[in-house]
Amino acid sequence: MTGPLEGVRVIDLTQALSGPYCTSILADYGADVIKVEPPRGDMIRHTGPFADDDAHHDFGNVFQNANRNKRSIVLDLKTEAGRAVLIELVRGADALVENFSTGVMDRLNLGYELLAEINPRLVYTSIRGFGDPRGGASPYAHWPAFDIVAQAMGGLMSITGPDSDTRVRVGSGIGDTVPGLFAALGTVMALFEAKTSGLGQYVDTAMTDGVLAVSEIVVNVFDATGTSPAPMGNALQGFAPFDTLRARDGEVALGAPHNAQWAKLCDIMGRPDLISDDRFDSDHHRWENREAVYDIVGAWVGRHTVSELVDLLGGKVPLAPVLDAAAIFADPHFAVRGMLPEVENPRTGRTTHVTGPVTKLTRTPGRVRHRAPLLGEHTAEILAEIGFDAERLVPLVAAETTHP
């Protein structure tokens, strides 16, 4: 079986996480993603974690996860030879994705307008902290950004934390990966439209915009009330019970904010009297009387172990144990869903787990076919494919690479 993007060629000029995450999604679903790296390589190659016996420290797990299914070519785009090869790659490409700072590609004479003249059907996608002026000229367009900047200015940090005095960053790189998801979706939409029109277009994604889009409570609450929502720990405004609760031997996440769920929970707790109690007889009343709700439910939860709660509530009321990494690796859900596939780690000779494709297509599924590439591993191969004398050009455009 082939992926739905089989036959699509993507030139990947991205580094770090947001861009590589975007292009890894395209690669998972069959696109031929050619990762163009500078002679020093993608900066994220040297970011751990690394296995204890990995003496090279140039193929970290973050890089492996975000660059599986890709091929690597080394081009120095500051040289004429490197730019000439990139232009030839663009001639036969369907899409190009980059996440340089605003203006970098233009200064290299590789901006969208020039490349669109060379290949009018090219879909050109950029991911920047505050977007590109082509999509809307932000006053912060030239500001550099990381995940934490996007989370802060996109509103997510304003609603995350135990209370309004302690704003925290979400533990994973949401400020990178969510914009990467939006950029992948935008790229696919533009590719779909190009099938009809024969023309590509510019696809502009701002990291801060992506974060705001998934921080919907920021917009919804302020628009309705004129006040800015504050962090509430693991609770959600307007919903009760909806929180993490302490069991005898751990924590569980529990949500039963609507009447049908509340009624099931009350029956399982042996408290059917609470269903008709006028303090708890509607979603809104339970929210208004949430302290009483949590006193009752919290006391019941606290008398049980996590395992007992799973047996009592699992499949009946929305409930989940709070799984750490070890528990996730042992849980049958992630195994049967193919969410932890293994690929080779060329630096240790063992295998490495990466996250698998999330969206399951039954006829043309995405899959992790091979590990991330070593730096410049496919330079000669790719040059030969586009008609260059690889033996002559490799020293001009690529760094000397090392292989295990």
Image: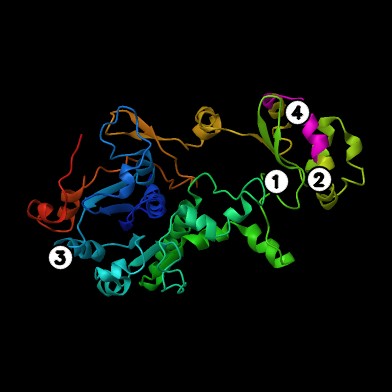
Disc 1 secondary structure class: loop
Question: Against 29, is 271 above or below?
Answer: above
Q: Amino acid at mark 2?
A: Arg
Tell me whether circle 4 and circle 1 mark residues in contact (CB < 8 Å): no
Q: Residue 162's quadrant in the figure?
A: top right
Circle 3 crowding by C-alpha within 10 Å: few under 14, some 14–19, many from 20: few
Residue 126 within the magenta-colored segment of the rendering = no
Q: Main secondary structure of the magenta part?
A: helix
The residue tagged 2 is 290
Which residue is identified by label 3?
80
Q: Position of residue 104 (x, y in %)?
A: 30, 66
Sequence-wise, the earlier of marks 3 and 2 is 3
Compared with 268, 5 (above or below) is below
Task: Decide if residue 108 is on the left or right side of residue 288.
Answer: left
Residue at (8% x, 51% y) in the render: 391
Look at the image and tell me in which quarter the N terminus lies. top left
Mark sitting on residue 235 = 1
